Image: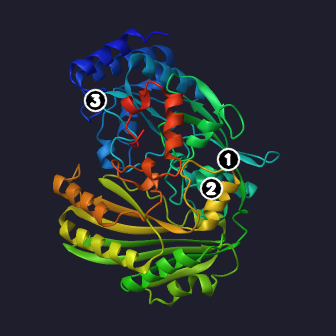
Amino acid sequence: MSLPRMRLLVLLAAILSGQSTPSLSPTGNETAGIAARQACTQLESSLGPLVQSSGDAYEAAATNAWNLQNAEYQPTCIVFPRTSAHVQVAMKAIYDAESHYAVQAGSHSAMKGWNTVQNGVLIIFSNMKNASYDKVADSITLQPGIHWLEAVTALEPYGVAPVGGRVGGVGTGLLLGGGLSWLSPSQGYAADTFKALDVVLVTGEMVTATATNEYADLFRALKGGGNRFGIVTRYELHAVHTGTKDAKTYFGGQIIYNSSAEALLKATARYVREVNDPKAVILVSLINMVVAETLVPLYFVALFYNGPDLPVDIFGDFLSIPAVTSQLGPLSYLDVAGSLGLGDGRGFVQHFGASALVGDDDLFLDAFNHWSNFSKAFQDDFNTTTLAFTPIPDSQIQAGRANGGNIIDAPSGGFAAVQIYETFRSGIDDIPADVQRGIDVLFEQIPPSPGLPLYLNECDSQQKVFETYGGYDELKDIYAKYDPTRFNVRHTQGPVGL
């Protein structure tokens, strides 16, 4: 089949301008603007009021992104689909016009340009937020616009929950990046719980992918492949029986420290090395707050156990460190899921970076020292800086393999996903060049331990996460099969390396 005329014109313009592909810069270019306007005109004709290019609904959606960098983009038009069919129509028009595009579900991406677009079409899922439970199939079905606390709250009366995000305001895009959850030690990455996915491919064709049908390779790629393989409009997930809000089957909560960083880091490293209990889960966050031009440390640990108490042999090191506050007690899973709040503060530039470390004391202490020096060097630019550790026990990896495996294909044995996170002060609307250079140096100073995968949902936009996957070669082959013209890579921002 020959390419539509506009697609040929866009490709020709790219070649004549010396580019290998059309520009995806935030300001775009005239060719991109022409393509986007053609797509929007077609969509306004076919989808009517579901497409907006101005007005209150447009402005609210365009400025909705959590990261201020993304909230300042102005899409040519925004599509508010209500059904998968609407997404198909939108993607077909985008494909035919060779337009840039983006997809937004929870709006929580810290990666610049990953959930919005300038001179392009934004598809936003604010009208697709349903959650349901099928008792016979014992499965949960989610539409892509729902946020995790909304999903857990809706499903709580049935005594079940999805393996989803730890921050309530995060959306379903977390699943496509693998997904770390309070339930992960027993269930695997969140993506390991997929049963079936409705996927709109770049051409506008919709397929349903499962582990056993003709799209099994696509199904596997979506377990960690991010936004590169299509737009998922329906997630069917294995349900986890967590109990209702009256079932206080968990114990735990939060501990806050303002000192003893070395003891906390050693406790975390030991946990990573030694703990492999699928009932235990922990998140360790070392935070520097900038208060009156001074760095004020605040170290936060969230720890939970699916049982009547916190076993001392697992959590004793954390419990023995002198704390500022400690709020521990019996909890329902709904309490656990809401423990970090919505994480929904807007109006600031947010930035993520990723590493991964085996449980070695020296590696953790070295990472902390480099991060502390970085925080001090650029403290005038920040509200907060964070160095966080999520232990990924071997029980999580084996649970995923028992359910068919994923494209991340982490090696056996426990390790920690490391998140490096900054919130910039008010008045900064983009990352200053000197700070970005400092971030790049920090990544070099805290490299992942050999063979360990980076976590896509907490990465810098230029980190080559896919290359750290055990299934990287397979991922490239699957991408080439489902997007042979590389439309997605050329027309939407996302993970590099395909």
Tell whether 340 sits left or right of 120: right
**Number of numbered discs present?**
3
- Residue under circle 3? 23
- Residue under circle 1? 237
Q: Considering the numbered disc 2 on the image, is that residue within a helix, a strand or a loop?
A: loop
Between marks 3 and 2 in the image, the one whose residue lies nearer the viewer: 3
Asked where in the image residue 39 lies, by quadrant, the reply is top left
Residue 117 rendering spot, x and y as whole percentages: 34, 34
Judged from this view, the residue extending furthest toward the right is 136
- Residue under circle 2? 163
Work out whether 184 lies above or below 302: above
Work out whether 363 lies above or below 337: below
Q: Earlier in the sequence, mark 1 or mark 3?
A: 3
Work out whether 117 lies above or below 346: above
Tell whether 85 sits left or right of 237: left
The amino acid beneath tag 2 is Val
Give the quarter of the figure containing the C terminus.
top left
Q: Earlier in the sequence, mark 1 or mark 2?
A: 2
Tell whether 486 sits left or right of 399: left
Q: Considering the numbered disc 1 on the image, is that residue within a helix, a strand or a loop?
A: strand
For image coordinates 18% across by 53% down, the residue present is 432
Tell me, yes or no, if residue 234 can be seen here: no
